[in-house]
Amino acid sequence: MAYKFYLFDFDYTLANAETGIVKCFKLLMQQEGYFISPDDEIKKTIGLPMIEAIRVLFKEDDDKLLHELKDKYTEFADIHMTPNTVLYQQTIPALRRIKESGAKTAIISSKTRRRIMQTLTRDNIADLVEFVIGSEDVKTHKPSPEGMFMAIERFGADKKDVLYIGDNVIDGEAAQNAGVDFAAVLTGNNVREDFFHLPHVKIMNTLAELP
């Protein structure tokens, strides 16, 4: 079916930022004297809220320390993240097809809105997305449906007309919790079988297969 509203995750769905994320985490670990995690371990946290990713990688639980580490991570990210974030080859054509069809798009991500907008602006595609809801815009992160509910309300959309696209099982759970259709894309760390237990309209290799 054709949808009127396409909501996208960002990391590993529209763009690959793993080089920047790995670099920033390693710099932070080195600066703060922590064990430097292997690349694969860092990549597995991509898509998690930043505080949760830090909790997992640094094995810390103190909220004050976690937020201090997040602030220090942001300093590295301000330098290294956007230059090391690359849109997938299929991203711009997919967004253009949606726009030309008359449908609307938005991004719902655990990444900050500011950081996502830097990439969209750099690549001159901010006009292909109606708005971005980032980590600073919600109180609860995916799999909470809060971000999706905000987007649905802003669009004045009927849930049956909404498709959420993401690379992570957490994205599928968020769509399920929001009561909207979900399409998985296999450009992240999850494999096809990971999505079988979740309601989905499609499991895609790339965004070129977007329904």
Image (cartoon, rainbow, N blue to C red):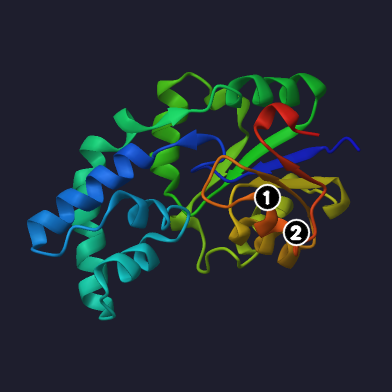
Locate the N terminus and report the quarter of the image it occupies: top right
Q: Is residue 127 above or below residue 168?
A: above
User: Is residue 41 at least partly visible in the picture?
Assistant: yes
The residue nearer to you, when weighing 43 against 73, is 43
Q: Residue furthest right?
A: 1
Q: Which mark is residue 192?
A: 1
Identify residue type, mark 1. Arg
Disc 2 and disc 1 in contact, CB within 8 angstroms: yes
State which quadrant residue 83 falls in.
top left
Q: Is residue 102 above or below residue 182?
A: above
Instruction: Tell me the crowding category of disc 1: few under 14, some 14 to 19, or many 20 or more residues within 10 angstroms, Cα based.
Output: few
Residue drawn at x 62%, y 42% is 186
Q: Which mark is residue 196?
A: 2
Q: 90 left or right of 121?
A: right
Place of residue 20 in the rendered image (x, y in percent of width and height, measured from the top left) = 30, 39
Question: The residue tagged with tag 2: helix, strand or loop?
Answer: loop
Residue drawn at x 17%, y 54% is 28
Residue drawn at x 51%, y 50% is 189
User: Is residue 149 at least partly visible in the picture?
Assistant: no
Place of residue 198 in the rendered image (x, y in percent of width and height, measured from the top left) = 75, 62
Identify residue type, mark 2. Phe
Instruction: Tell me the crowding category of disc 2: few under 14, some 14 to 19, or many 20 or more residues within 10 angstroms, Cα based.
Output: few
Q: Is residue 26 above or below residue 5?
A: below
Q: Which mark is residue 203?
A: none
Q: 85 left or right of 211?
A: left
